[in-house]
Image (cartoon, helix red, strand yellow):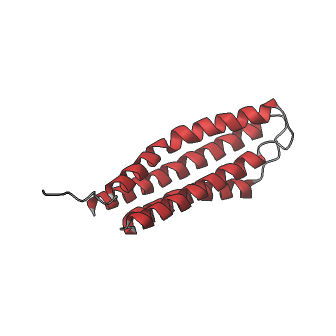
Amino acid sequence: MIRRVLAALVFIAGGLLTWALLMFAKGYGASQAAMSAGAGSHVPNRDLLYICGFCSYFVVSAVGALFGTKPKTLKIVAVVAYGILLATFVAICASLGKGSGEGVLQEILTLSLIAAIYFAPWSVVWLVLLSRHEPNAPTQNT
């Protein structure tokens, strides 16, 4: 039980950190756009959707870690959490530049690297949760 509570707390801390970092990046981006000669097309509601999407990953993960007691339940919650994360990532990549070209591909690759590095610690937490709840092989006493 303690491991599940600790994992839930780690996911909640990750969600708060993600929210704070994204709000900082949003404010920083808005200040940079205000200083530039021509602000690009910026859709604030879309930014809020992305922030909610990333934070939803952590909420689903925390609830699953806390209340998921069976290995099958934990696996389903992990798939749902990473599905939310993937959908949010795809939505961001789809909105990156409407034109084609090397610049858009470079932005997607950079975003992929940042996402992989940022979400790696929480992937490790999921791996620990899933490995700790796997049923042990029966021992034979012969």
> In percent of the image, x 55 and y 40: which residue is there?
116
Which quadrant of the figure has residue 135? Answer: bottom left
**Depth order, front residue of 77/91:** 77
Query: Would residue 66 be found to the left or right of residue 24 on screen?
Result: left
Identified at 55% across, 62% down, the residue is 80
Farthest-out residue, front = 142
Quadrant holding the C terminus: bottom left
Q: Residue at x 49, y 49 (%)?
A: 17
Q: Position of residue 86 (x, y in %)?
A: 62, 52
- Position of 16 with respect to 52 (left or right) is left
Q: Quadrant of the N terminus?
A: bottom left
Furthest residue toward right = 99
Residue at left offset 43%, top offset 63%: 74
Q: How far across and down, in percent of the image, does residue 29 sit?
A: 69, 41
Q: Position of residue 127 (x, y in %)?
A: 41, 50
Above/below status of 66 relative to 118: below
The part of the image, by quadrant, that contains residue 141 is bottom left
Q: Residue 114, relative to residue 23: is it above or below?
A: above
Q: Quadrant of residue 8?
A: bottom left
Nearer-the-camera pick, 65 or 18: 65
